Amino acid sequence: MDYEASMDRAANRLGFQQETGLAALKSTMVCNGGAILALLTFLGNKSAQYDASELESALTFFFFGVLLTLGGYIAGYFSQVILMGFDIDVAWNFQDDMKAEPRSRDVNKAGLGGALCLGLAVTAVVVSILCFGLGAFAALRGIL
């Protein structure tokens, strides 16, 4: 495989990763937000029998799931901003190399910052999914 084909494959994989990450963020927002609406609708039914403390716990888990998803969106955005700056700095360093000059940009900090934000975004989504599971379990205990 030649250079161009390798770069095309890498770009396609990166696009798939971006789409998958965005789908995960959207899904956790819909799941946790929808669960909040469903519980509020259930609570509006006066004839329903339920354990209020368990449903309060469920709403709390779902609420934190929504907050974590929003945090994931924000961390994902900043990871891309930082990594864009990283790519620009790497390009400047390549130009310095071509001119046989010392590298003018320190890319290690930007790369680390971007990776950290990306890790925070992924962690937020995973914990949001965990919040949904815990909230669903608490809701079932409160209803049944």
Image (cartoon, helix red, strand yellow):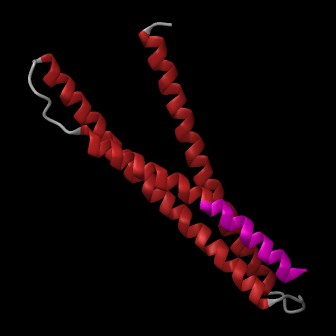
Residue at 73%, 70% (x, y): give it.
Answer: 134
Q: Residue furthest bottom?
A: 46
- Relative to 138, is 52 above or below? below
Residue at 52%, 40% (x, y): give it.
Answer: 18
Q: Position of residue 29 (x, y in %)?
A: 62, 61
Residue 130 among magenta residues:
yes
Residue at 41%, 52% (x, y): give it.
Answer: 117
Instruction: Return the residue nearer the eye: 118 or 37.
Output: 118
The region drawn magenta spans 127-144
Q: Is residue 93 left or right of residue 58?
A: left
- Relative to 51, is 33 above or below? above
- Relative to 65, is 4 above or below? above
Q: Position of residue 95 (x, y in %)?
A: 17, 23
Q: Main secondary structure of the magenta part?
A: helix
Residue 95 among magenta residues:
no
Q: Is residue 35 left or right of residue 142?
A: left
Regarding residue 29, the answer to whether it shows in the image is no
Regarding residue 65, the answer to whether it shows in the image is yes
- Relative to 43, is 37 above or below? above
Q: How many marks?
A: 0
Q: Position of residue 60 (x, y in %)?
A: 65, 79
Residue at 73%, 81% (x, y): give it.
Answer: 40
Quarter of the image that includes the C terminus:
bottom right
Q: Position of residue 122 (x, y in %)?
A: 54, 52
- Which quarter of the figure has residue 56? bottom right
- Which quarter of the figure has residue 106? top left
